[in-house]
Image (tube, rainbow, N blue to C red):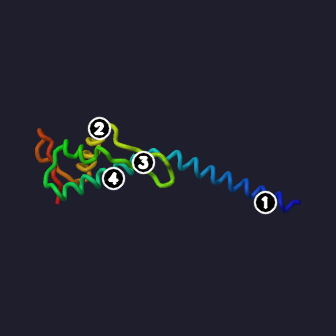
Amino acid sequence: MSKYIVYIIIIAIITMALIYIGMQKEKSLDIKLINKLYIKCCNKVMKSFKNKETMSGLEIREVIKDEEASIIWSKKKLKVTNKIQFTNYVIDGLLNLNKIELINEQKRIYRAKK
C-alpha cells in the first residue's frame, strides 16, 4: 500500500514540474515570436540584396509584407501587420548592425555593405 502512495507522489511531482515548465515557456513566447520574425525578415532582406544592388524602403516593405513566424512547440503565429513600422524597425536594425548603408536620404535608398 505504501508503495502506491510513493508512486502517486512521484507522478504528482512530475506533473507539477511539467506544468511549471509549460507556464515558463508560455511567458516567453511573445518575445521569442517577435525575435524570430525580426530575424526572418532581416535574413530575407539580405537575400534580396543579393539579387538587387540597391533597394528603396518601399521595396524592402514589399519583401517582408507577408512574413510569418511560429515556434515549434506552440500553435501561435505572428505575422507582420503594420508593414511601415516593422519595415522601419528592420531597416534601423540592419543599419545598426552595419549590414546595409543609406545611399540617398531623400528617396530612402539602401545597399548592402560588402
Tell me the SS state at disc 3. Answer: helix
21 with respect to 35 (left or right):
right
Residue position for label 3? 33
Residue position for label 2? 85
Q: Earlier in the sequence, mark 4 or mark 1?
A: 1
Residue at mark 4 to residue at mark 1: CA–CA distance:
46 Å
Q: Which corner quadrant holds the C terminus?
A: bottom left
Residue 86, image x and y in percent?
Answer: 30, 41
Q: Earlier in the sequence, mark 3 or mark 1?
A: 1
Residue position for label 1? 7
Tell me the number on the disc at residue 51: none
Residue at mark 3 to residue at mark 4: CA–CA distance:
10 Å
Amino acid at the residue labelled 1: Tyr
Residue at mark 2 to residue at mark 4: CA–CA distance:
16 Å
Tell me the SS state at disc 4. Answer: helix
Q: Which of marks 1 and 2 is nearer the N terminus?
A: 1
Q: Earlier in the sequence, mark 3 or mark 4?
A: 3
Amino acid at the residue labelled 2: Gln
Tell me the SS state at disc 2. Answer: helix
Residue 43, image x and y in percent?
Answer: 29, 55
Q: Residue at 33%, 53% (x, y): give it.
A: 40
Q: Picture quarter containing residue 85?
A: top left
- Give the camera-side residue of 8 and 104: 8
Residue position for label 4? 40
Amino acid at the residue labelled 4: Lys
58 with respect to 71 (left or right):
left
Is 15 located above or below residue 65 in the figure? below
Q: Residue at 18%, 55% (x, y): give it.
A: 112
